[in-house]
Amino acid sequence: MKCVVAMMQHETNTFSTLSTELAAFGSGVGLKAPPSGEQAISIYGAADFAFAGMLAVARAHGADCVVPVTAYAEPSGKVDDDAFDSICKQICDAVKQGCDAVLLDLHGAMVTQSYDDGEGELLRRIREISPGIPIAVALDFHTNLTAAMVDNCNVIDGYRTYPHIDMYATGERAAQSLFHCLDYGITTRMSWQALPMMTHMIKQTPLRQPMKDIMDLAIEAVDNTAILNASVFGGFPLADIPHISLSVLAVEPSENFLGEGLVKQLCAMAWKRRHDFIFEPEPMVDSVKTAKQFETYPVVIADHGDNCGAGGNADDLSVLDEMLRQGLSSIIAGPFWDRQAVERMIACGEGNEITLTIGGNTSVPSIGQVGHSISCTGTVRKITDGRFVIKGPMQTGLEVCLGRTAILDIGAAQIVLSEERWEPYDPGCFTHAGLDPEGCRYILVKSRQHFRAGFEAIASHIVLAAGPGVCSSDYAQFDFKRLVKPMFPLDLDMTLEDRRPV
């Protein structure tokens, strides 16, 4: 048996000014283009990714696996058409060579210059080449589900966690369902519903209510009924596209009819709790004041407005500036994206003093944000190649490359500056450079939820800080032109009867 196993991952914030070129799909692991073949397997094949789970299941079934590409980019603006077409072509060319099944690790929130639904377009192209080819897809919890995704594959399974610590397991589940169907000649039916809800990402996590028992019921149905897969997708709200939603999907043998009832039940629960998915941030100044009052350490401060894990620039220093203004010290902060500052610090050399302006290089005109920098004098404490292996529970085993990375010691803070953007969900971004997160008072990271995977266990307290940025929690800042309305919570008094589900 021959299987095509591939990955194409990008979460697109359409309000971001950062274009996503082909190089972005390799830069996170230190490459200039996304890897393929044995190189792809050596990088992602033993890490906590759905791709690795799919690959393991296929090999366990004795399949010959072809890996045309593993493309993974940090969230940013729209994917360039050339990059999208290049990745799609690699996958489609592999399918054209002939195969018995296709296993895809996708995201579910990719927007390109020409397509609102990148994943749906890829699947459509594959089906055009081979209409009857069995396809299993693993999707991110933040998928904005579409008919094109559902209609063009046989099995879909989504992450059950946020932070995403079950990526490998999701790939396993999707692949196992597909092979089960192939082994026993089972055809599948998929039932799904998408609700017109923009759930806030801080309120989505299945670890807590209102999402927890919705996800628990979906898992229970898979464990105790003939339903093969059941997924709840919190959705990704920071995109100006028609199909933003919270959605539920069930996969079952075509002769069964349990999925539709489960989907309706879970959607009814989510809609009834819709107001519980709203997050009201406090002013950033107040959050820093709260952090200052604690007497046990470390205190993790998460700047969620400029989080590159949702498309942020990761270079606005408003929160760090406020922390310094309020007199906080013993701070470890970063990584902040500033290639020019890193270049200057490398030229200055380790152990030498430097005065420079850091951060604030990227503005976001779409929301009226002007990049905020700080000018400071400090010592170049350390220069690294930015490489480390993730040891925490999310993407475990992946060797990350931040690009060249420099540590600026300004006395009150040790500031990590890097050539690449990366959401800090593992302490390795600090420890690889000799910094000790557990020995400081304050850890400043740019993240919404994923930081909890690596930092919650060592934090005495966690404070959420609403710094400015393209991941702002204030939806009024965003000029949605293509979003289908009414949409909750932009239209707080709407009912489902006001608009058919997307």
Image (spheres, grey):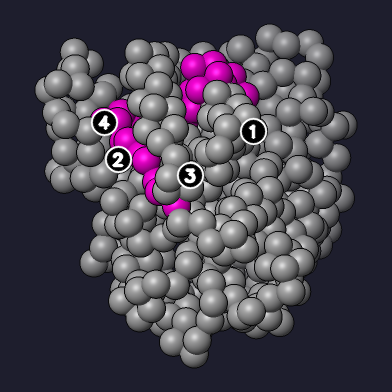
Q: Residue at x 78, y 19 (%)?
A: 460
Please identify, in this view, whether the residue under mark 2 or under mark 3 is nearer the observer: 3
Which dot marks residue 196?
4
Few, some or many residues within 10 Å of mark 3 (<14, 14–19, 20+): many
Q: Residue at x 35, y 74 (%)?
A: 131
Dot 2 amino acid type = Ile
In the displayed image of the protein, which residue is found farthest to the left?
498
Residue 276 visible in rendering: yes
Q: How far apart are marks 2 and 3 (CA)?
A: 25 Å
- Residue marked by disc 2: 244
- Residue marked by disc 3: 252
The answer to whether 225 is drawn above or below residue 426 in the figure is above
Task: Please report the bounds of the magenta region as a residue range.
Answer: 188-214
Please identify, in this view, whether the residue under mark 2 or under mark 1 is nearer the observer: 1
Do the residues bearing badges 2 and 1 touch, measured as CB atoms within 8 Å?
no
Dot 4 amino acid type = Pro
Work out whether residue 134 or residue 476 is closer to the camera in this orientation and state it: 134
Q: Quadrant of the C terminus?
A: top left
Dot 3 amino acid type = Glu
Q: Residue at x 53, y 81 (%)?
A: 99
Report x, y in % for residue 409. Answer: 75, 45
